[in-house]
Amino acid sequence: MAGECVSEGRDLKEMGEEELWELINDNRHRISLGVRPYILIPYLRQARVLTEMDEDEIISCHNLTNRCMRTSYMLDLLRTQGRNGAVALLEGLMIHYPGLYTQVTGRKPSTEPSRFSGLIKYSELTEYLVRAVTGMQKELQEARNEAGKMSTRCASLESEISQIMEQDEKSRHLQAENERMRRHLCTLQREVTKLKDEKCDLYMRYTAAIEEKSAVNKRLHDLNLQVSGQAIYLVVTCVCVQLLDQKECLSLQVQQLTLDCNMHEQKDIVIQNFFYSSLSGTSVPPFLMRSRPKAIRINGRVLSISFQGETLLSQLTVVGGNKTGVFVHKVTEGSPAHTVGISPGAQIVEVSYELNQKALRMVLEDSTLEEAMWALSQVTGLCHLSLRRREDDYAALLKQLQSNETSSGDSFYVRVNISLPTGPNGTLAVSCNDILHVTNTRHADSEDSWYASQVHPCQPLDLQSGTLPPIDSIQNINCANSFLLCHQDGHLVAQNKQKAVRIVSTGRQGRNPLWVSVEDEKEMNTDTGGTCGRRSCVTLMPYTLVTPHYPPVCRPILLLPTVLGRMLNKKLASWQGFQLCDPEVLSPCEHAARLQRSDILEESEQGTKSCYTLQGVEKIMKKGIHCVLPLGLDCVRRLHRADIFPIIIFVGQSARSARKLRSKLQRHSQREEQLLACSRSEEPLLDKLPCLYRSVAPDSWCDQTSLLTNLRTIIWEEQKKIVWVEPDLW
């Protein structure tokens, strides 16, 4: 490097104009990167190689957008000044950029007057050097001051870090103490529950003793009335003595049970006072302190209360839904519900009653608000409510309702099976296979409507919102005539091209997943608006429940119809990031074991011992690539049970589209008629899938290349989407 050979550099005074500029141009890139023009310009102005106009042009020209361009332009202006321009530039570097000067010239910098060229007078040069040194000293002092400030700031930050660490240590101690107190409170709570159970048992024994004592008194009274005559006086006396002895014994038992009850009550009060005082003075819930009727049974934290439930909804007002639970919100004062001690804040877990001498039970643990109000409206006569205290959850729900963060405690997702146009009063327009997020099944503006939002396909975000009819208001499905449904070859199909309705078919008679479960389903079978046979049930069900799944990247690919899939699967597998699923050859024992575990997806055409298995699919997925499945629709439910959710693509076929694949079909010993027949037979089965699929229109591609391009785009789009899956109704 030139900086390391400073003794070999030639004196600038001995070099000519061309040598000097050749030296500068050889280091032009280094000078352009390392020099700030505004620092050298004052010296160059004094050396009279730059004018004021040159300075303005270098500093202010809009075409010079960065420092390197301005420095390069300054060198071009100095080149016009010949040798003086080069000497002045190098002298400026010697003063302001001594390191760069050494790298360019190979000489050590010096501020001795003899080393300068004489472009500036000695007095002016001395004055300039003094100003330059003063400026450098000022910059050095500012840098030292800044370093001092940074050192002070660093010390301050170290002090703050130390304080934060101390606070973190205290926080850990407090968390440990809090955890210890929570465990202690849990222990006390278990003790309280145990005492309540013992107290309830004592109440029952006490009641039984009182009843037995009353029965003895009645028997004694009846005997005294029946006794007449002196002849049987001794017998009656003997019998009375025996009954009196029994009465006295029972009286002693009653006294002992009374003492036990009092003792347990005192112990219960002491523990309850400690327990509730530990919860920052929270008031004691009425269920815990109220004198309970004989009908109340305490099972852990659930209370079962029996009372007369005629017009139950006039006694109780409820809020909540399937997400939060259904809570008692208001209780009519003086009603049977109020008399037995029901108060706001209790979650209704279950309701049971008798109808026509049949016991009916409806579980409201995760029911919607609509289902809960329907269930409570069915109650007649004596009913039993199972309640659980959840004061904090109830208070949080009320806060959300008051702040309009939510309109109810409902939250579930449904798949739409019927297209509905926009209606009055903000009715949401929906299409078949849309996914909706239902947030209120008893909307305030219209109690017979649901409030729902369309869901973003790739994120759990609510989009356009509005009301839509609930299930029971579409049960008659008078609009089904407009869908032109017809029954052909044992399948229900739609005559119009655009899909407007999806036929939900189940393999067994079953209740809609949204309905309340009842013990005796045979007696409480509800008409769903469709026709049901002995072995199958075809139902016009407007909505079906779905749950979201977020599978990992690279889901398996299932291409339909299967005739087309067998032709294109190898093409898909040849892409980067794709691999064809190959069958495994199994021994008879292993084949039987896999078959018993339901690990076999489909038997290979090569024989019964060569199979496509779940393990084969999972092995490819673990590589982070798409598994191309050469299988049919039968494998979908088996894959879902293993939490594997394939991308299902159905390429619609027409006579015209089949002709586009004629040469491909012939190479695979297939005919156009076979492809069309396969498409017609498999398309109706798509509606039976518990998940959404992607359709490709027959006229959306012109040849095999464009079809493969469309498939690649579809796979990329579907991979980003949420997978919505219905409960398996088969």
Image (cartoon, rainbow, N blue to C red):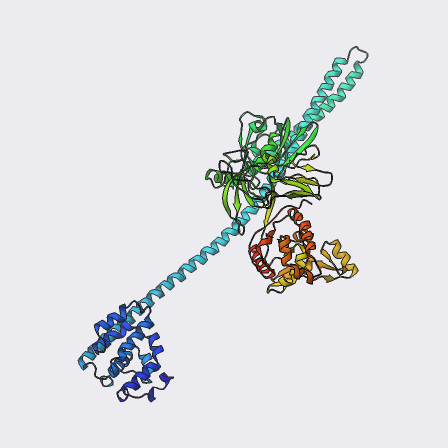
| In-image side of 273 versus 260 (left or right) | left
Q: Is residue 116 left or right of residue 602?
A: left
Residue 74 found in image quarter: bottom left
Q: Residue at x 67, y 50 (%)?
A: 680
Rendering coords of residue 467 (x, y %): 52, 38
Name the image quarter holding residue 89: bottom left
Give percent across and percent down for residue 530. 66, 37
Location of residue 260 (image quadrant): top right
The N terminus appears in which quarter of the rendering?
Answer: bottom left
The residue that appears at 59% across and 38% down in the rendered structure is 482
The vertical placement of 168 against 96, above or below, is above
Residue farthest top in this picture: 229
Q: How many marks?
A: 0
Question: Residue at horizontal 60%, vertical 64%?
Answer: 575
Against 280, is 82 above or below? Answer: below
Q: Is residue 89 visible?
A: yes
Q: Nearer the viewer, residue 208 or 552?
A: 552
Q: Mark yes or no: residue 633 visible.
A: no
> Residue 566 appears at what percent x and percent y?
68, 59
666, 231: nearer the viewer: 666
Specify whether 83 is left or right of 498. Answer: left
Query: Does residue 244 sit above or below 726 in this rendering?
Result: above
Q: State the residue in front, 244 or 584.
A: 584
Residue 377: x and y in percent read 60, 30
